Image (cartoon, helix red, strand yellow):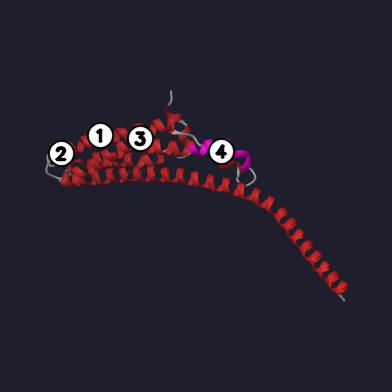
Amino acid sequence: MKQARTLRSFISASVVASTCFLALCSCDKKEKPGASFSKADSLTETFLTLQDSMVASWNAMISDDDTKIKAMHHLLHQLSVLNPASRDELKVFEGRVDGLVSLRYDQRTMSDTEIVSEYDFASNALVSELVSLAESQPEFTSDKALQKLVDDIRDADLRVDNYRDEYDANASRLNQFIEENGIYLKATEEKSFLEKRPLFQMASDP
């Protein structure tokens, strides 16, 4: 009887030990793929975060540029109200302001220095001419709305370089990450997403 109990105890202990061993082996096998997946997932998450930062800085820059263009349109409207005789001349300015959007670079064409330079030349010329035209009006010194539009245009024009510097900083961080980790991301990201982004700094270099 005592021997039977001992045998049953031994068998039970053996079963428990075997079960634990198999469970440990199973866990060990599952951890390795999990660890590998976590690394790839972490790299992808970092890549997307850097990309989001770059896109956010780009969108902020374009939004501010759109605001400047709208302010130009509002200024031309105010000038036409103040000076109806100049409406034909102001329509020419309207056409030039409308053309800015079609001239503007995007995240790929900005690698072409001529496209960026052409847009900057057209935008700077309009800012200079419209501000001078507004300030030459007799009503300018007393017209707060006109003064505010001029200030808005000037301020937005002065912010361009800051926005471009911020975009370049974010794009540079993304480019460095792609250079260091692109080989690990090839399996999870499309090739086009892993291409390095052009910088304004490159476009402005001689």
Determine the CA span between mark 3 and mark 2: 30 Å
Q: Amino acid at mark 2?
A: Gln
Q: Position of residue 172 (x, y in %)?
A: 48, 36
Determine the CA span between mark 1 and mark 3: 20 Å
Res 105 visible? no
Q: Are marks 4 and 1 in contact (CB under 8 Å)?
A: no
Residue with the mark numbered 3: 161
Determine the CA span between mark 1 and mark 2: 13 Å
Determine the CA span between mark 4 and mark 1: 43 Å
* Residue range (magenta): 173-184
Outermost residue, front side: 2
Q: Position of residue 86 (x, y in %)?
A: 20, 40
Q: Nearer the viewer, residue 20 or 3?
A: 3
Disc 1 packing (10 Å; few <14; some 14–19; many ≥20)? few
Label drawn at residue 137: 2
Q: Amino acid at mark 3?
A: Asp
Q: Quarter of the image containing the N terminus?
A: bottom right
Quarter of image, res 13: bottom right
Q: Amino acid at mark 1?
A: Glu
